[in-house]
Amino acid sequence: NPAVNITSGNIGFSIAFGGDSEFGHRSIDGNNLALKLACNDSNAFYITVNSDMDGASTTLMHFRRKGYRGIYAELSTWLKSKSVEYDKDILLQRLLNENMFFNYFFAVGKDMESDRYAALTSRSPRYYVSGAFWERDSFLWSFPAIKLVDSEFYSSLCRDMILMHAKNAGDHAHYIDGTVLYPGFELDEAASYFILLGSMEDIDDDILRALEAVFKRIEREYDCDTGLYRTFLMPSDDPSEYPFLTIDNVILWSGLKNLMRLYQRMGLAEKAQLIGSRIEGIYNGIYNNLVKNIDGTGIFVWSCDGIGGFSLYNDPPGNLGLLHYYGFIDCQEELFRNTIEYYYSNKYKYYCESSKINELACDHHPNTPSGLGLCGSILNPVLQDRAIGWLKAANMDFGLLCESFDRETGEAKTGVGFATGSGYLAFALYHVLIQARK
């Protein structure tokens, strides 16, 4: 069977190729194989990868021993056992499961050298920033969907990724080993550690130290005059006009409640008291600085500088419709409904009333609705029914979530192969269709 070593820089691995039955082949220009099969013959071919040629070849032997029928039956049985059932709407059931499994298989990979798992945006080369790590994307979007498939794997992954990435908490993007790829502080990314904490059961000393290091980094952005915390970049990874963002501070407010409860369980009263004061300060700071009267109606604005300046914006990865999801305000309150009504109206520059799909666009892609914004709208009870209708009208990336899509056809425009985004969609659907109705 053909096998080849592949090297590039400091990376080396091997690939082997074979089939269930005999076949002929010849090399074409050293990079391609021409296969020779007997007329009307059939075969199943395997491609295996390992650290060296011996490992690739023995893995190929293992695959041939199992046979494609056995491999297919094993995978099919596993997928059926892990699928989420929602027989009220077969299309939504398919979208939930396909996005859930794409996230499960493509937002996590195993390092061939260390044999350890690593989380990443996507293993798909179709995604334009594949192979790197964003805390927000993994902790807030991908991991909740992984938990739907395998809760034990989820628990181990949470622990390993917190320990790997906490040393650079909040930096825009990391390499998959936790070192900084793209600097720039993002408050929502740093706060995502504490959101993750809320679903973790076993907190050991290593995790506690890591979380305390994250909080120490966040404290550098504390503003005693407003009670709020600063960010440099928005959830879209673009620079923010003003430093205090509503959604970022809400995510931190929600996450710090998890940290406070942990300290209370551990009997660390002084630390719990400090966190409690920060929680109260954020809450008051948001209402004092980030609620403005616009056209005679009070709404949440996107950001402010704490001295009067503010911006009217709604960044899809941090959709303001998530204020209810994070428990900051009830969806029935007038202030929340006014906020949603403002941004999803012709008063807002990135809303298009005449389009078939009315999800918001943004600075990042001003002419196309956002897939991430759509997930936020699904989690928003005020827009939930409309958002699910938009989802069913948008094929996006052949049913998988994409960054943005055409507002009329629903066809993907940017960000295909977006594995962590698919996790966000899968979890959002599960949350509103199944979890919230139990």
Image (spheres, rainbow, N blue to C red):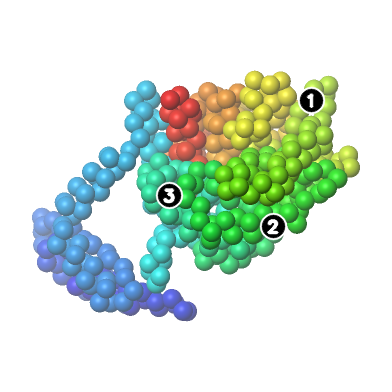
Which quadrant, please, contains the C terminus? top left
Q: Pick whichever, 269 or 220, lies toward us.
A: 269
Q: Residue at x 19, y 72 (%)?
A: 1
Q: Pick whichever, 89 or 381, lies toward us.
A: 381
Give the distance between the C-alpha atoms of the residues marked 2 and 1, in whole angstroms: 34 Å
In the rendered image, residue 45, in percent from the top left (x then y), is placed at 21, 61
Q: Earlier in the sequence, mark 3 or mark 1?
A: 3
Label 2 sits on residue: 216
Q: Secondary structure at mark 2?
A: helix
Between disc 2 and disc 3, the foreground one is: 2
Q: Earlier in the sequence, mark 2 or mark 1?
A: 2
Drawn side of residue 376 relative to residue 228, left or right: left
In the rendered image, residue 223, in percent from the top left (x then y), is placed at 81, 49
Label 3 sits on residue: 154
Q: Pick whichever, 45 or 37, lies toward us.
A: 45
Q: Residue at x 57, y 48 (%)?
A: 266
The amino acid marked with disc number 1 is Gly
Q: Are marks 2 and 3 in contact (CB under 8 Å)?
A: no
The amino acid marked with disc number 3 is Tyr
In the rendered image, residue 218, in percent from the top left (x then y), is placed at 70, 54
Label 1 sits on residue: 298
Q: Pick whichever, 243 or 31, lies toward us.
A: 243
Toward the right, the furthest residue is: 307
Q: Are marks 2 and 1 in contact (CB under 8 Å)?
A: no
* Crowd rating for badge 1 (residues with CA inside 10 Å; few <14, some 14–19, many 20+): some
* Crowd rating for badge 2 (residues with CA inside 10 Å; few <14, some 14–19, many 20+): few
Q: Secondary structure at mark 1?
A: strand
Q: Quadrant of residue 331?
A: top right
